[in-house]
Image (spheres, rainbow, N blue to C red):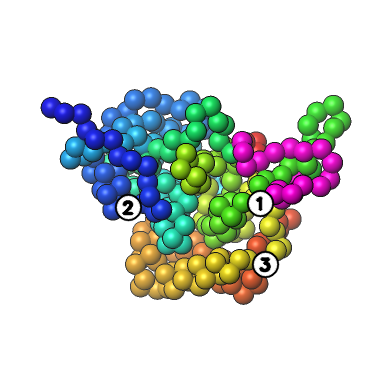
């Protein structure tokens, strides 16, 4: 029997082919990421002669979060993917909710990063002084030991700026550097979206460099389209209602409306730590 054909890297957005493969294919566990705080299993998935690498996060392997009592991480990961797809930016790898070897869980397409490159390493930096420098945006001063501080910066990159908008919409409480995956084809993906969609402001991110600045025309256009997709009865809203609570869905609509009303990137609220820890 011939070996399954390996699926090429995803296109601009997750395709029906990718979703069908992840949803219907046979999952085979090949390892575990032990550094993760929840169960994260590396798998292969094969269906009708096509295979790919993926990540499987079973609900049974999740640690309860006191401030996220409803739903589970897997459902919020899928919800984040659906919102990402609605923007047309394709910032989250193809993600589905399905049964697996250890019960229901999230299955997400594995993204290969350039060999030897640490995720986010080319997009984040610590620099001396108080100026970010050309091509960079300042985030915050960070202690680097022995009483020294350095300026945390991120690249002034349109891909990151789109991700900052998506994070504001889904209320991402954990945007770390290690969650930024630049693919060899130049695409940028964000992963680990379990801590999202809270009804209260929980935005914690390393991408504060545009805080208070006007949204791009592209972002405003995308947000206007997203507002329509979130209306009662729209397919996206109907699907999200199966994954997050009614209160959380209403909060998503409110956040999109606020972004459109103010026309600027959000700023730290001061009521919640603005930067995740550890930042990587």
Separation of marks 1 and 3 at Cα, in angstroms: 14 Å
Magenta segment includes 124: yes
Marking on residue 214: 3
Rendered image quadrant of residue 276: top right
Separation of marks 2 and 1 at Cα, in angstroms: 29 Å
Q: Is residue 122 visible?
A: yes
Left or right relative to 1: residue 215: right
Please state the horizontal and vertical placement of residue 248, each as a whole percent of the image.
49, 61
For label 3, count other residues whose C-alpha is less than 10 Å away and answer few (under 14), some (14-19) or many (20+): some
**Quarter of the image where the C terminus is located:** top right
Q: Which residue is mark 1?
A: 156
For marks 1 and 3, the one nearer the N-term is: 1
For label 2, count other residues whose C-alpha is less than 10 Å away and answer few (under 14), some (14-19) or many (20+): few
Per the rendered image, the range of residues in magenta is: 121-140
Magenta segment includes 242: no
Q: Is residue 72 visible?
A: no
For marks 2 and 1, the one nearer the N-term is: 2
Please state the horizontal and vertical placement of residue 174, each as a whole percent of the image.
58, 45
Q: Which residue is mark 2?
A: 15
**Quarter of the image where the N terminus is located:** top left
For marks 3 and 2, the one nearer the N-term is: 2
Left or right relative to 87: residue 132: right
Please state the horizontal and vertical placement of residue 183, each as a whole percent of the image.
48, 40
Indicate the secondary structure of the residue bearing disc 2. loop
The residue lying at 55 percent from left, 65 percent from top is 219
The residue lying at 65 percent from left, 62 percent from top is 265
Please state the horizontal and vertical placement of residue 193, each as a whole percent of the image.
49, 47
């Amino acid at each position: 029997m011939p070996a399954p054909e390996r699926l090429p890297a995803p296109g601009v957005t997750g395709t029906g082919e990718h979703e069908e493969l992840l949803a219907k294919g046979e999952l085979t566990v090949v390892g575990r990421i032990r550094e993760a705080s929840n169960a994260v299993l590396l798998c292969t998935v094969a269906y009708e002669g096509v295979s790919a690498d993926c990540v499987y996060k079973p609900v049974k392997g999740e640690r309860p979060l006191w401030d996220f009592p409803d739903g589970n991480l897997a459902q919020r990961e899928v919800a984040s993917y659906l919102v990402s797809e609605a923007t047309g930016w394709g910032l989250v790898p193809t993600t589905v909710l399905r049964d697996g070897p250890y019960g229901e869980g999230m299955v997400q397409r594995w993204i290969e990063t350039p060999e030897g490159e640490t995720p986010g390493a080319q997009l984040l930096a610590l620099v001396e002084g108080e100026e970010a420098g050309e091509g960079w945006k300042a985030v915050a001063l960070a202690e680097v030991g022995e009483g020294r501080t350095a300026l945390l910066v991120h690249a002034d990159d349109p891909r990151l700026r789109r991700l900052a908008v998506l994070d504001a919409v889904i209320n991402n409480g954990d945007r770390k550097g290690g969650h930024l995956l630049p693919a060899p084809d130049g695409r940028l993906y964000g992963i680990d979206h379990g801590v999202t969609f809270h009804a209260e402001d929980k935005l914690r991110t390393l991408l504060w460099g545009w805080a208070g600045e006007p949204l791009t025309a592209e972002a405003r256009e995308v947000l206007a389209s997203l507002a329509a997709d979130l209306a009662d009865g729209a397919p996206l809203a109907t699907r999200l209602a199966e994954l997050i609570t009614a209160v959380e869905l209403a909060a998503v609509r409110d956040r999109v409306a606020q972004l459109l009303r103010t026309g600027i990137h959000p700023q730290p609220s001061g009521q919640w730590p603005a930067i995740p820890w550890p930042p990587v």
